[in-house]
Image: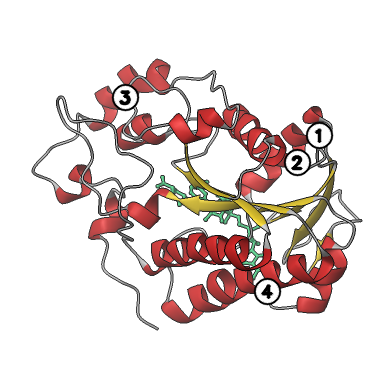
Amino acid sequence: MPAPRTVLLTGAAGQLGSMMRGLLPRYGYELRLLDVRPIEGEPDAVVADLADREALREAVRGADAVVHLAGISVESTFEKILRANIEGTYHLYEAAREEGVRRIVFASSNHAVGYTPRPQGDDPLIPVDTPRRPDTFYGLSKSFGEDLAQFYWDKHGLETVSVRIGSCFPEPRSVRSLSLWLSPEDAARLFHAALSADGVGHTVVHGSSANTRLWWDLTSARALGYEPRDDSERYAAELLAEQGPLRPDDPAHARLGGHFVTDPPLWP
Ligand code: NAI
Ligand code: 15L
């Protein structure tokens, strides 16, 4: 596949989207922006809901690839998750297929495998083919997105890299996220690798920096050419002093998904 140049960034108004708007052009991409919310200072951004197939078709037309960040990014009611994340991602894939887009980078999440016990002691890192164990309706929608991506590759030859993002914020916010943190700069490195690697078919990768306390295996991400440069360890002393160490007897500390595992489900 020729190196993509024009990339549609969905969810461009969000916190990750805003950081990627600043970082991805450094790799030579020309970004088109889409979000259901207007973006200040970006008059050309497409303001559209993922339910609007026509708007999606127009937005992807002529694009080489899509970085799909749009959607509800935390737990919500099943109805809202269904509309934005499950149906919305389907609409995006259909628009991409209809317009001949060759590759999507899909923002999956650690919450697709949130019930997985975190490694303790000498336990091995969690492999990327660990069974999916969603911890929320939100995590279920990411699990669906990964299956959708596999289906569109097998059925239509539309490639996807599903990035199971750990925790991507300017700085880690908790002791748990010392293990899962993906720095914004490493996120851009990983998205660039996912956009530019050859022959990805459907590849699932873990999205974290090179954290000292890493819980999951980055081999499939590195195989795309991703070379993380950041490590959350420089935040460890302060976060541990504030929050104390993770307790193995606390279910929210013992599973990958953290409090998403123990929070009660949201009903309409
Ligand atoms: P965010 O909530 O800040 O941004 C999501 C964006 O999607 C928002 O700007 C929102 O307006 C837009 N959006 C929501 N529903 C939409 C719809 N129906 N149509 C069009 N746009 C819609 O979330 P954040 O943190 O920027 O995350 C981006 C993506 O990465 C999300 O898909 C999230 O699930 C995923 N992710 C993020 C992680 C993180 O640590 N930030 C971790 C794991 C996954
Ligand atoms: C996610 O999937 C969320 O989108 C983000 O807001 C964080 O909660 C992150 O996971 C996390 O697990 O830290």
Q: Quadrant of residue 39?
A: bottom right
Are the two marked residues, 4 and 1, in contact with CB atoms closer than 8 angstroms?
Answer: no
Task: Look at discs 2 and 4 and give the one toward the viewer.
Answer: 4
Which residue appears at 36% of the width and 47% of the height? 129
Are the two marked residues, 2 and 1, in contact with CB atoms closer than 8 angstroms?
Answer: yes
The residue lying toward the viewer, choosing from 92 and 153, is: 153
Q: Quadrant of residue 247?
A: top left
Marks 4 and 1 sit apart, C-alpha to C-alpha, by 26 Å
Of labels 1 and 3, earlier in sequence is: 1
Find residue 21 and name its label.
2
Identify the residue position indicated by label 3 in the image.
Answer: 213
Q: Residues within 10 Å of mark 4 (few under 14, many from 20)?
A: many
Say what secondary structure mark 4 lies in.
helix
Identify the residue position indicated by label 1 in the image.
Answer: 25
The residue lying toward the viewer, choosing from 200 and 66, is: 200
Q: Residues within 10 Å of mark 2 (few under 14, many from 20)?
A: some
**Relative vertical location of residue 257 with respect to residue 86 in this rendering, above or below:** above
Say what secondary structure mark 3 lies in.
loop
The quadrant of the image that shows the N terminus is top right
Say what secondary structure mark 2 lies in.
helix
Q: Is residue 36 left or right of residue 205?
A: right
Identify the residue position indicated by label 4 in the image.
Answer: 91
Q: Residues within 10 Å of mark 3 (few under 14, many from 20)?
A: some
Of labels 2 and 4, earlier in sequence is: 2
